[in-house]
Amino acid sequence: MKRNAFAFLLGLAAGALIITIALFFWNRQKMTKVHVLEAPLLLQSNEMNDYLHLLPKGTTLYYDTSFPEGFSRYKVYINIDRMPLALKELADPTMVDPLTAHALDAGDLRRVLRDYPLSKRDLESILKSKALSRDDIKEVFNSYLESTK
């Protein structure tokens, strides 16, 4: 009887050890990778073509997955304070309708300067991001100055 109890406890301890090790390696593989934006990104979707939306500098993007087509998907977490939102079941949880984000090019910057309340900090980070050449920046600012005359 003592041998059976001892064998049972030994088996229980071994099982717990195996589960603990498995969970340790499972959680280690699930390490979250993040990127903090150094410059704003322009957001686009089929429904927002007429409006400008920027994902601000300093936003943390949580890596989700990469696709063979060459793009990667990230998540952004947003706290909504004291405003319950109506939720619905997604018919197909694999179907996601993501926004597209990209660095601003010269045409985007012209439009943002014209239509969007851009802060000095955001403008500095866009210009430092190296998404635009010096000639692009000169051209954008010359056209901006001409349009404000």
Image (cartoon, grey):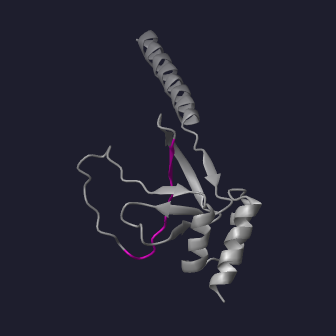
The quadrant the C terminus occupies is: bottom right
113 vs 10, nearest the viewer: 113
Q: Main secondary structure of the magenta part?
A: loop
119 vs 132, nearest the viewer: 132
Above or below, comparing residue 149 to residue 52 in the picture: below
112 sits to left or right of 11: right
21 vs 4, nearest the viewer: 21
Q: How many marks?
A: 0
Give the magenta-colored segment's residue range.
71-83
Residue at point 70%, 63% (across, down): 136
Residue 7 visible at all: yes
Residue at point 44%, 57% (across, down): 99
Q: Position of residue 27 (x, y in %)?
A: 54, 36
Q: Position of residue 15 (x, y in %)?
A: 47, 21
Q: Position of residue 129 (x, y in %)?
A: 71, 58
Looking at this view, name the residue that lies furthest to the left.
91
Q: Position of residue 142 (x, y in %)?
A: 71, 76
Residue at point 42%, 66% (across, down): 49
Q: Quadrant of residue 84?
A: bottom left
Q: Quadrant of residue 8?
A: top left
Above or below, comparing residue 3 to residue 143 in the picture: above
The quadrant the N terminus occupies is: top left
Above or below, comparing residue 43 to residue 98 in the picture: below
Above or below, comparing residue 147 to residue 12 in the picture: below
Residue 68 lies in magenta, yes or no? no
Residue 80 lies in magenta, yes or no? yes
Looking at this view, name the residue that lies furthest to the bottom.
149
Q: Quadrant of residue 32?
A: top right
